[in-house]
């Protein structure tokens, strides 16, 4: 059986939860949160109505290889939570839960991603974990630039292998 990992990330933004959620509710903003090295582009015509059942198609490059990725929004509960799941793409499983909580002076943005990469543990150890960390580091830095806050508002990313 292929191993599954879970990533957890959390940061505090000094803005109210409805404003932060509204930013995430515009799928076009995903491009601003994705590192340039991925050459990420949304293919789905805009505007995209975010709701359970919405499909979003992207193209990107991973280590120079062109990838097509399709996500489905499987849970849509504004302004507290949504989930996107990969239907087509490089992972055997990609389940990304976004939650938003009121925080002192702002909003906690929480990410929980369960993922099963191709090529198993060796690929995860050699390449994938480093790439996933870099993507979420860039995401946090971008959100801090857009909404304010400091590096002190970012909790370390945790990646753990899940038991089978």
Image (tube, rainbow, N blue to C red):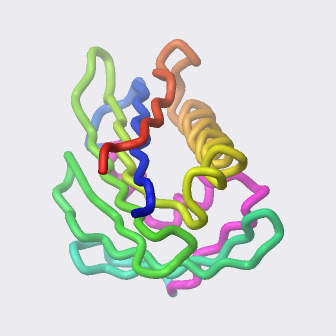
Most foreground residue, 56 or 26:
56
Q: Quadrant of residue 34?
A: bottom right
Q: Quadrant of residue 9?
A: top left
User: Which of 44 and 110 lies nearest the eye of the viewer?
Assistant: 110
In the displayed image of the protein, which residue is found farthest to the front? 1
Task: Report x, y in % for residue 27.
Answer: 45, 66
| Residue lying furthest bottom | 45
Place of residue 11 in the rendered image (x, y in percent of width and height, measured from the top left): 43, 27
Q: Is residue 97 left or right of residue 63?
A: left
Q: Residue at x 56, y 31 (%)?
A: 144
Q: In the rendered view, would you say 101 is above or below 45?
A: above
**Compared to 62, does 149 lie above or below?**
above
Front in this rendered view, residue 25 or 95 = 95
Q: Is 31 part of what is drawn in magenta?
A: yes
Q: Which residues are magenta?
A: 19-44
| In the image, farthest residue toward the right | 64
At x 23%, y 33%, the residue is 101
Determine the main secondary structure of the stretch shown in magenta. Answer: helix
Asked if the stretch drawn in magenta spans residue 124, the answer is no
Q: Residue at x 42, y 41 (%)?
A: 161
Residue 32 in the image, given as x and y percentages of width and height: 62, 54
- Kindly identify the residue that appears in the image at 29 percent across and 60 percent down: 83
Give the quarter of the figure containing the N terminus.
bottom left
- In which image quadrant can residue 140 be found? top right
């Amino acid at each position: 059986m292929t191993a599954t990992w879970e990533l957890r990330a959390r940061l505090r933004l000094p803005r109210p939860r409805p404003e932060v959620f509204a930013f995430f509710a515009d799928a076009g903003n995903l491009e601003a949160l994705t590192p340039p090295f991925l050459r990420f582009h949304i293919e789905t015509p805009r505007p995209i109505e975010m709701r359970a059942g919405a499909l979003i198609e992207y193209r990107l490059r991973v280590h120079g290889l062109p990838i097509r990725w399709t996500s489905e929004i499987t849970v849509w509960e504004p302004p507290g939570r949504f989930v996107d799941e990969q239907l087509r793409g490089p992972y055997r499983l990609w389940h990304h839960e976004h939650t938003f909580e009121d925080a002192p002076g702002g909003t906690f943005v929480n990410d929980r991603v369960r993922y099963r990469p191709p090529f198993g543990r060796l690929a995860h150890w050699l390449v994938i974990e480093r790439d996933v960390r870099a993507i979420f580091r860039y995401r946090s830095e971008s959100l801090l630039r857009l909404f304010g806050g400091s590096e002190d508002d970012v909790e370390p990313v945790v990646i753990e292998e899940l038991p089978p």
